[in-house]
Amino acid sequence: MHKPSLSRKFFLGFNYAFLIGLGLLCFLPIVHILAVSLSSKGAATAGIVKLWPVDFTLSSYQYVLNKPQFMVAMWVTVQRVVLGTGISMLLTLLIAYPLSKEPRDFKFRTQYAWLVVPGAVAVFNVILLLNFFRGLPKELEESCFIDGGSYITSLWKIYAPLSLPAMATVTLFTIVGQWNEWFDGLLLMNSPEKYPLSSYLQTVIVQTNLTSINADDAAALSEVSNRTFKAAQIFIGSLPILLLYPFLQRFFVKGIVLGSVKE
């Protein structure tokens, strides 16, 4: 068996080292935030917490979960993700399918591409799904037409079921985008009580909101610092996406490859 050359070994070693380093750059900040959120007020304030909790405590999480503002923001975000992802996926499917046709089959394809609801559809997702549709055998759709089916029948009975890997990938992109979006919450909501979670967390991080407290919060704040409070909220806000990703990961690479540009 042919042995890899020295340059090939060096190239592979560099790639592995680079990818491992890149992974650690993404993973270690999450571990640090988790460690801070589980540490005592004194340890977090002194800045001695690195990657492991110091004086382990759940006080910050108890305080966060008992704050009505946080739970309301979480619920608003869940509603946004469900509604926004559903609308985005439906429009992405309905846009990508006709755009995957040749001009002779859809004369107004270019004009149709401009009729998109702002913010509801990501162009990248449309391109990904469009290229996936173009890669499917045309004979499948022709057989549908022979049996008396329409384009709508072809979309829902043939294209949609066959595109599940690509749609799972696009769904993951959409969910993450909807969950992390914060600016339009600040821009469109006139009441902080209606902020989605990311907008709420942005105000918490930028503004110090532990200065104005009531009597009920006084006991809890004796064990919670501003830093552990923020870290706990950030980690709880990130946890749903971190838990969702492993379930969709098996579709991720396959969906990207199937929807890539084909020569």
Image (cartoon, rainbow, N blue to C red):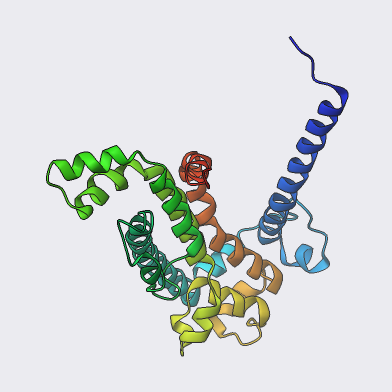
Q: Which residue is drawn at 46% across and 86% down?
A: 189
Asked if residue 31 is positioned above or below residue 196 in the image, the reply reads above
Question: Left or right of 115: which side holds 69?
Answer: right
Q: In which quarter of the image is residue 8?
A: top right
**Front residue (pair 104, 92):** 104
Question: Left or right of 143: which side holds 72?
Answer: right
Measured as percent of width and height from the top left, residue 125 is found at: 47, 58
Residue at the far top: name it. 1
Q: What number of labels is visible?
A: 0
**Front residue (pair 163, 195):** 163
Residue at the far front: name it. 104
Asked if residue 113 is positioned above or below residue 245 in the image, the reply reads below
Q: Quadrant of residue 40?
A: bottom right
Measured as percent of width and height from the top left, residue 25 is found at: 75, 52
Measured as percent of width and height from the top left, residue 182 is found at: 54, 75
Measured as percent of width and height from the top left, residue 159 is found at: 31, 46
Q: Residue at x 47, y 65 (%)?
A: 122
Question: Left or right of 70: which side holds 115?
Answer: left
Asked if residue 2 is positioned above or below residue 69 in the image, the reply reads above
Residue at the far bottom: name it. 190
**Front residue (pair 35, 126):** 126
Quadrant of the drawing holding the N terminus: top right
Q: Residue at x 69, y 50 (%)?
A: 27
Residue at the far right: name it. 6
Q: In which quarter of the image is residue 228?
A: bottom right
Q: Residue at x 43, y 81 (%)?
A: 194
